[in-house]
Image (spheres, rainbow, N blue to C red):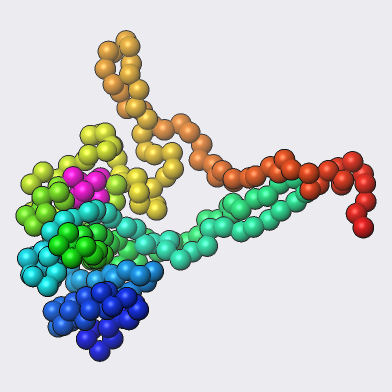
Amino acid sequence: MTDSVPITGDPRLDTLAQTLAASFGEHGCLLTAAYGELTLEVPADQLLMVLQALRDQEAFRYEQLIDLCGVDYVAYGLDEWDTSASESIFSRGVDRDPELDLDAPRRFAVVYHLLSLHYNRRLRVRVYTDTAQPVVDSVTEIWPAANWFEREAFDLFGILFKGHPDLRRILTDYGFVGHPFRKDFPLSGQVAMRYDPEQQRVIYEPVEIEPRVLVPKVRREDSRYLGRRSGEGHA
């Protein structure tokens, strides 16, 4: 990584990039820059070591974990929009059913957003997981705030966090099947839940909603087509 340190044009970020490269380049980390921000990609087996150093070393001092989230890259880069227009309708929706490679390597990732209060600078850290069984180490021992963030990523993406003290669902119901933020999860869900007054309890039933694709449209209410609708010609 030392030979390909990204240049951002910001002296503070460029100095940080040089320090990151010197500290973690030999551990297989990859540093990239985009939109005035740095992203450090870390191998899964080096995650705890790197994050511990980012928090404790004087050159970094990332004391605060701002956010932790899961990412599903299976449809990353695929175009889902097309523009078409008529006299009365403007549409950007596309009814597309791509053949997604659900077993693609590097499908799932965990992203950490770090803040150094001492230096007033931020850093994004990303670690990819195994697709068949996405597991990464829990960072709750480094930043206790990661507890609920990791539960959310587990609930929505199915990413497991090894060493988490209480890894269970946090947003969906206890009987929920699947992980709703995966691209292969049906929009209508798997089961429906309702209260049965006769049994006086909550029951689960198969979903009866027929899947359909909604195409967003914009109806123009301005005067650009008034002449055409009234039969008047245009020069």
Residue in the picture at 21% in, 40% down? 169
Q: Residue 120's spot in the image, x, y percent?
A: 21, 62
Q: Residue 150's spot in the image, x, y percent?
A: 19, 50
The residue nearer to you, when weighing 81 against 226, is 226
Q: Quadrant of the N terminus?
A: bottom left
Q: Quadrant of the C terminus?
A: bottom right
Question: Is there any visible trace of residue 31 in the rendered image?
Answer: no
Residue in the picture at 16% in, 56% down? 64
The residue nearer to you, when weighing 143 against 162, is 143
Q: Residue 182's spot in the image, x, y percent?
A: 35, 52
Question: Is there any visible trace of residue 143 in the rendered image?
Answer: yes
Q: Is residue 32 above or below residue 71?
A: below
Q: Quadrant of residue 72?
A: bottom left
Q: Residue 57's spot in the image, x, y percent?
A: 7, 70
Q: Is residue 24 above or below residue 39?
A: below
Residue in the picture at 8% in, 57% down? 142
- Magenta region: which residues? 148-155
Q: Is residue 126 above or below residue 167?
A: below
User: Going by the image, does 104 lie left or right of 128?
Assistant: right
The residue nearer to you, when weighing 66 against 156, is 66
User: Going by the image, does 204 lie left or right of 150?
Assistant: right
Most common SS among magenta residues: helix
Q: Does the stretch in magenta take in 153? A: yes
User: Going by the image, does 64 lie left or right of 113?
Assistant: left
Q: Is residue 112 above or below residue 232?
A: below
Q: Does the stretch in magenta take in 22? A: no
